[in-house]
Amino acid sequence: MSRGVEVLLGGNQSTAAGVNAAYRFLRQRSDWTAACVGLNTQHFLSYKRPIGQLAVFYSFDKNTAITLECAYRTTFEEQQSLRNVVTDFLGNDVSIFRSLLTEYLTTYVLPEVRVGREFDASYFAWTMNEICEAAESATFTAIGSRQSRGIPTENTLHRIASTFWRFEKVKSVHVQNYRSELQVNVLLAIEKYDHDLMDELFDAEYDLRTSLNEIVFSFCYTPVGESVNSDVKHPLARALFTR
Amino acid sequence: MAEFAVHIKQADHNRQVALALLQQEPFHDWAITAAFYSAIHLFEAWLYHRGPKHSETDIPRDDKGDLKFSPHAWREKLVTDRLPRHAFKDYRHLKESSETARYLSLPRSAGPGANWTPTGAWEHLSLDDARRMVNNHLASFTKTLDLEYSQFIESIDFESTVGNSAPIVRQTLIRDYSDRQSLMKESLSELRRKYGAGVAEAFRIAAEKKPNTAPQ
């Protein structure tokens, strides 16, 4: 039985937006047995396998990453290998797709979840049959909308404060939200650039960034000398400590 | 945003500016800014074949379509997540010192009327500081990124053999091989087996034009 295939439009400058659009599309078509959508911001590959027909849509728009186009559409016979059809289309070995799609999960989907983006792919069937054996475990729970992103917990703020408290030259630490990132403004009692101090601060910053990976930070170290300024902080910034 | 080759050229251009400014004391403070913008282009070139392609188009958006993070913050997250600690520190040294050199204070961190350092940037950052940024941190960052392999892959004309799949092929080859030497150890038949006839053919053509410069 042959069946029409629709172009999957997930094109967007945001990877997750593209995937979510694709996901919504797929959810509306539960009678289709397998689906795989993905790659990244610039590369979209969609594959649907209703009974008796295959369509592959691939687009590469090097300038905008927005335009998707139908690059290939065909029907294939039951006895024709799905692998061969795709291989013919791209002229590449299918291992490229297997590895890319597997990597896609860890490189693109999981980071989106980690930064708190609402993402529910629990029904997302990553079954490319002969093409891709991977990723049936692709179940990611939407936790983002229930988290107050950009508003760190008190424990997080305490951790930031205690990290910088041990540096004698740190006069104060303020935090403020900007968009969804957390800006950490560290005022330094230095009048000349202190390379060794900065080196230690960057080590501490790296530890914070990697251990609190779900937060997108912006650190700023401002030299203020020895003078005490009462107006060094933005009205909306919150002081973690001053001394 | 730019193509890979443009990022490379701009990075080199900015580095040359930095080196020239180091010879022009007291304008050495601007060498740091030139060095930082060299580092940005180097990282964008590195990223070009590794997924996001451009950090700025990779920034997540909220439900209204607005960017959730500033470009610098998102790029720093990519640097943190994808490069080793020492490269992160090289990048941060360049960024932070260049911002200090340009602003001394950042408007976002203070209200009006704040008193800041009593000196100008060229005094706050010594010539030695500037030299260290260019000669140590930028050089180290450049070495870590090792863009020679990316440049080699970029030079192979996959477009003529695999068409629109060329970007994916480049990404895959850069991910699968750590450097050019490891790729050169592969035979064409092995590359054909792994990536298909089109990929092997592109290497064959490249090797034909310049023997011993591509797998054969």
Image (cartoon, coloured by chain):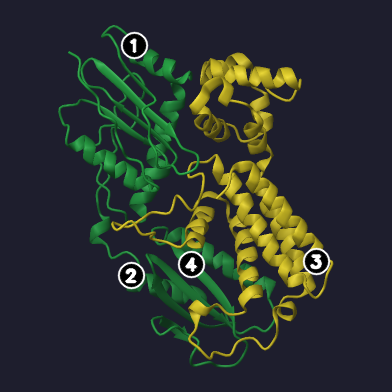
Left/right placement of residue B216 relative to residue A216 reads right
SS for tag 1? loop
Q: Are the two marked residues, 4 and 3, in contact with CB atoms closer than 8 angstroms?
A: no
> Upstream in the sequence, badge 2 or badge 1?
1
Q: CA distance from mark 3 to mark 1?
A: 63 Å
Q: Chain of mark 2?
A: A
Q: CA distance from mark 4 to mark 2?
A: 14 Å
Tell me which residue sits at (40%, 62%) in the image: A215
Tell me which residue sits at (27%, 8%) in the image: A77
Give B2 or B34, whichever is nearer the viewer.
Answer: B2
> Upstream in the sequence, badge 1 or badge 4?
1
| Residue designated by label 2 | A151
Amino acid of disc 1: Ser
Give A49 or A132, whichever is nearer the viewer.
Answer: A49
Tell me the crowding category of disc 4: few under 14, some 14 to 19, or many 20 or more residues within 10 angstroms, Cα based.
many
| Residue designated by label 4 | A218
Note whether B95 is above or below A78 in the view shown.
Answer: below
Left/right placement of residue A224 relative to residue A31 reads right
| Residue designated by label 3 | B22
Amino acid of disc 3: Leu
Tell me the crowding category of disc 1: few under 14, some 14 to 19, or many 20 or more residues within 10 angstroms, Cα based.
few
Q: Which chain is green?
A: A
| Residue designated by label 1 | A81
Q: Mark on residue A131?
A: none
